[in-house]
């Protein structure tokens, strides 16, 4: 007979690991399923508040970034310094994800190194899962049963693919990066170990951006796009050369889809809940996902916990409701911003010019670090809006 769990969490990234940890802490029997053999391509940035929100020790940070350098198609650069309000913590997913999975195990979750092959629902609402192990030479499928399943298994979620209609799929860009050895003794105009470089250039990405993010001894260099036919491997190579990092030794190369819009519904109303990338909770415009994934894991755990207590699936919808109530407006604004400013290099040039404005910089950093829109200075928002319009239509300062 297959072992029965209260919850099986499919996917052991930041979202799934946090969900499994929280559910185990609440006394539920939990199985965390992850192949444990793949690293997701990711810039690795988290806001400083994530350490307090999710109990992350500073030892998990491989670097701190105190500024960003924004680079326009023309080569113009704008430095955005954070100041004393916080910092951007940099993590390496090769060590950060296993740390989070180990936390879940220490909280009481069982672990299975493998992937989901099949899932069916019986007439009583129970779920039967077929899992293939990745650490077994025989690789014989194993059967498990669950009262609830959380699909935290990425943009190409097997849970979503097996149990939801094909139309239930968020839009995404494809991201690719190379982890290289960080240069030693490089000039600051080329590389700074505490600065993230963000490149807005149609040659690097026609609809997104490129990045150079330091990770201590390593650095992530990459880009993303939804435009078919754009060679992001070649774009990344060009970015490495343009950034003066072409001679840095490559440690590893990774690529994966990156969803950029939360799905309208994350659950099936009965026993399955999608979360994290599987539900599309990556911020448009910036592509930020780690903080939102961990939060999504926590919210999903709470929703599943209440669903199990109530004995029905109504509470599952609570995860999306709480998430969108807190972050839906930010996602909407970032999505609009991407559609307006990322369309061509002329607009990207104007966007970078706008980033030089002190109001834009302050509101950007405060919103990113606090994970909410800043409301204490409404006049600053008005000024930024007017400057936005002026930049968009090419109006000189006297016409604003």
Image (tube, rainbow, N blue to C red):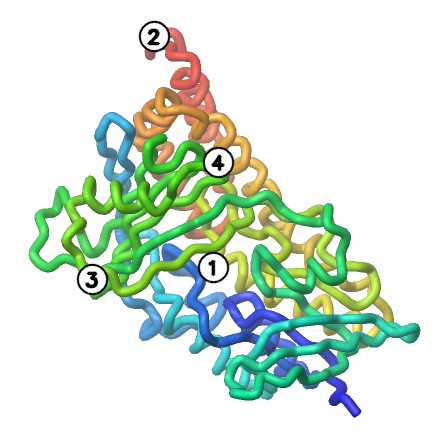
Q: Is residue 240 left or right of residue 183?
A: right
Q: Is residue 78 left or right of residue 388?
A: left
Q: Residue at x 48, y 33 (%)?
A: 338
Tag 2 and tag 1, C-beta contact below 8 Å: no
Which residue is under mark 2?
398
Q: Position of residue 295 (x, y in %)?
A: 56, 62
Mark nearest the camera among 2 and 3 is 3
Mark nearest the camera among 4 and 2 is 4
Q: CA distance from mark 1 to mark 3?
A: 23 Å
Of callouts 4 and 2, the N-terminal one: 4
Query: Could you say which is closer to the camera, residue 193 or residue 237?
Result: 237
Which residue is under mark 1?
290
Which residue is under mark 3?
181
Tag 2 and tag 3, C-beta contact below 8 Å: no
Q: Position of residue 104 (x, y in %)?
A: 54, 80
Residue furthest top as drawn: 399
Of callouts 4 and 1, the N-terminal one: 4
Of callouts 2 and 1, the N-terminal one: 1
Classify 342 as above or below 255: above
């Amino acid at each position: 007979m297959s072992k029965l769990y209260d919850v099986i969490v499919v996917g052991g990234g930041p979202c799934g690991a946090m969900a499994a940890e929280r559910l185990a802490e609440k006394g539920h029997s939990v199985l965390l399923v992850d192949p444990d053999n793949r690293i997701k391509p990711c810039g690795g940035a988290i806001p400083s508040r994530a350490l307090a929100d999710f109990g992350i020790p500073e030892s998990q940070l491989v670097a701190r970034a105190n500024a960003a350098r924004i680079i326009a198609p023309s080569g113009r650069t704008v430095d955005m310094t954070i100041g004393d309000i916080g910092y951007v913590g940099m993590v390496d997913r090769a060590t950060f994800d296993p740390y989070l999975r180990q936390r879940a195990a220490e909280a009481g979750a069982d672990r299975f190194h493998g992937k989901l092959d099949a899932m069916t629902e019986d007439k009583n609402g129970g779920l039967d899962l077929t899992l293939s192990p990745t650490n077994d030479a025989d690789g014989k499928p194993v059967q498990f049963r669950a009262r609830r399943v959380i699909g935290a298994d990425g943009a190409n979620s097997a849970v979503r693919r097996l149990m939801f209609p094909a139309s239930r799929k968020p839009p995404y860009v494809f991201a690719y990066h190379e982890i290289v050895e960080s240069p030693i003794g490089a000039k600051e105009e080329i590389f700074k170990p505490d600065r993230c470089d963000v490149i807005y250039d149609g040659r690097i990405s026609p609809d997104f951006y490129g990045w150079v993010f330091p990770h201590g001894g390593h650095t992530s260099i990459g880009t993303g796009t939804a435009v078919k036919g754009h060679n992001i491997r070649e774009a990344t190579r060009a970015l490495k050369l343009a950034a003066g990092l072409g001679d840095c030794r490559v440690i590893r190369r990774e690529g994966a889809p990156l969803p950029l819009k939360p799905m309208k519904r994350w659950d099936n109303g009965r026993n399955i809940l999608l979360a994290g990338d599987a539900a599309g909770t990556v911020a448009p415009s910036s592509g930020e996902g780690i903080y939102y994934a961990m939060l999504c894991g926590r919210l999903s755990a709470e929703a599943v916990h209440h669903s199990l207590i109530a004995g029905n699936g109504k509470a599952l919808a609570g995860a999306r409701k709480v998430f969108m109530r807190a972050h839906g407006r930010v996602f909407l604004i970032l999505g609009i911003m991407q559609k307006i400013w990322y369309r061509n290099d002329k607009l990207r040039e104007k966007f970078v010019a706008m980033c030089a404005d002190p109001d834009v910089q302050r509101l950007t950093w405060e919103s990113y670090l606090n994970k909410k829109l800043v409301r204490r200075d409404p006049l600053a928002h008005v000024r930024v809006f007017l400057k936005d319009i002026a930049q968009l239509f090419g109006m000189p300062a006297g016409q604003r």
